Amino acid sequence: MEEINIYEEEISLREIISVLKKRLRLITVVVAICIMAAATYTFWIKKPVYESYTTIMVGKPVQRVQDSSAPITYQELQTNRLLVSTYGEIAKSRSTLEEVLRRLNLNTTYEKLKSRIKVNLVKNTEIIEIRVSDHDPVMAATIANAVSESFSRQVIRIMNVENVQVIDEAIPIYQKVQPKPVLNLSLSLILGLMMGVFFAFLQESFDTSIKSPEDVAKYLGLPVIGSIPYIEKGEVA
């Protein structure tokens, strides 16, 4: 019984390889189309996206600034870290970003601007990182700095404490974050191979034409008792 199973597995594997070889041209065409589509999107359609960021430290009240020699207690540190999450929401609030829209006269909406801003809370610190993406690296840095300034004013107004300090102002970064050519082309290659193999087996399943003695037994269930070879015209003596 085991020998029969092994034999069937060998035949199944042989058939798979045979189908892939037979439909190699189809697979190649599908892969080429996927790669060309990805390349067209990556290099000609998708606009480059740049990202700039500014880092801000929060949690130092006015009285601590006035008396910088006084040590910060553990309780104060924990309280300030809890406030960081609140500050993260303030940084992306409507009040903060609408002030940025007015100040820079940006031709966009609050929702669209918010979608281009990421606020990262650095773990176990009192530091917030504000990242802004834009098609122009200079504009990305300009918006990031404007958000930082607007955020500082909103914290003073809402929290009634002046406890925001800019660590690093945003500067233009000319390295693109999107599109990612290597990633896009790699994914298109994998997708193309998967689609190519799928279409190869799909085409094979609809192809019931008889091309070999093996096909007679496979599709008709009849034994082959003989065959007539095909002779080219030029081969006739």
Image: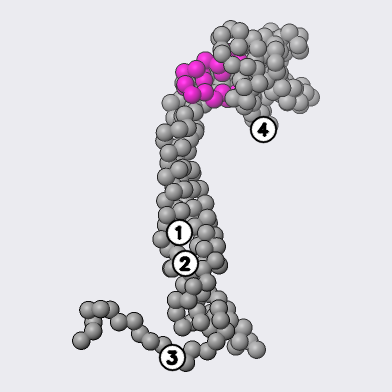
Q: Are marks 3 and 1 in contact (CB under 8 Å)?
A: no
Whole-number angstrom distance, CA of label 3 to CA of label 4: 78 Å
Chain part drawn in magenta: 129-147
Looking at numbered disc 3 in the image, what kind of residue is underneath it? Gly
Marked residue nearer the N-terminal end (4 or 1): 1
Whole-number angstrom distance, CA of label 1 to CA of label 2: 8 Å
Of badges 2 and 4, the one in the foreground is 2
Q: 208 or 154: nearer the eye?
A: 208
Q: Mark 3 points at which residue?
A: 226
Whole-number angstrom distance, CA of label 4 to CA of label 1: 48 Å
Residue 123 disc label: 4
Q: How crowded is mark 1: few (under 14 residues within 10 Å), some or many (20 or more)?
A: many
Q: Does the magenta stretch include residue 166?
A: no
Q: Name the residue under label 2.
A: 20
Q: 153 or 48: nearer the eye?
A: 48
Q: Which colour scheme is used?
A: one colour
